[in-house]
Image (cartoon, rainbow, N blue to C red):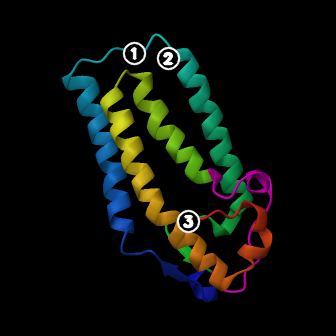
Amino acid sequence: MLAQGAYEVGASHYPYMVTMHVCFFISLIVEVFIFDRAISPLFPLFLLLFIFVQLLRVWCLASLGSFWNTKIIILPDANVVKSGPYTLMRHPNYVVVCLEILLLPFMFQAYFTGIAFTLLNLAMLSVRIPTEEKALIEATNYEDKFKKKISAS
């Protein structure tokens, strides 16, 4: 996309997001092994939900195609994807990440990690989503496509 004239926004918060995700996995491993957490009695339910969330992720990625990226890459004048799960909500891939960050620790009763990183992720998204939406509104047809789904984030 960069070769087609796309540009990145939100680069200043991206390293913090990556660091948060790395720390999530470190915290999960430490909490499970150091504090000897057992597999949750609700593990089968959490696993089923986790698998469902992964199917939603595949649907998101397939719908976005070449537009998917972990960074916020904006292609000016692009037609914003409004198919797949994007017909139902604005940011389904962020919902996937939120659910993963909650479900994975709960599978192993790592409640500190699940709750702490859910809160950290929500704080990160409170910066990321408005940054992404502002850039999309300024450079694409995002506002027209998502008029009824844009909130004051």
Residue type indicated by callout 2: Phe
Label 2: which secondary element: helix
**Image marks 1 and 3: residues in contact by CB distance under 8 Å:** no
Residue type indicated by callout 3: Asn
Label 3: which secondary element: loop
Q: Position of residue 14 (x, y in %)?
A: 39, 67
Magenta stretch contains residue 86: yes
Q: In the rendered view, would you say 125 is above or below 51?
A: below
**Image marks 2 and 3: residues in contact by CB distance under 8 Å:** no
Label 2 – label 3 distance at C-alpha: 31 Å
Q: Which residues are magenta?
A: 75-92
Q: Residue at x 40, y 54 (%)?
A: 123
> Residue 73: which quarter of the image?
bottom right
Q: Residue furthest left?
A: 34
Q: Residue at x 27, y 38 (%)?
A: 27
**Image marks 2 and 1: residues in contact by CB distance under 8 Å:** yes
- Mark closer to the chain start, 1 or 3: 1
Q: Residues within 10 Å of mark 3 (few under 14, many from 20)?
A: few
Label 1: which secondary element: loop
Q: In the rendered view, would you say 105 is above or below 66?
A: above
Label 2 – label 1 distance at C-alpha: 7 Å
Number of marks: 3
Q: Residue furthest front?
A: 152
Q: Position of residue 76 (x, y in %)?
A: 66, 86
User: Where is the N terminus found, in terms of image quarters?
Assistant: bottom right
Q: Nearer the viewer, residue 125 or 48?
A: 125
User: Where is the C terminus found, in terms of image quarters?
Assistant: bottom right
Magenta stretch contains residue 79: yes
Q: Which residue is mark 1?
A: 39
Residue type indicated by callout 1: Ile
Classify residue 101 as left or right of residue 95: left
Q: Which residue is mark 3?
A: 69
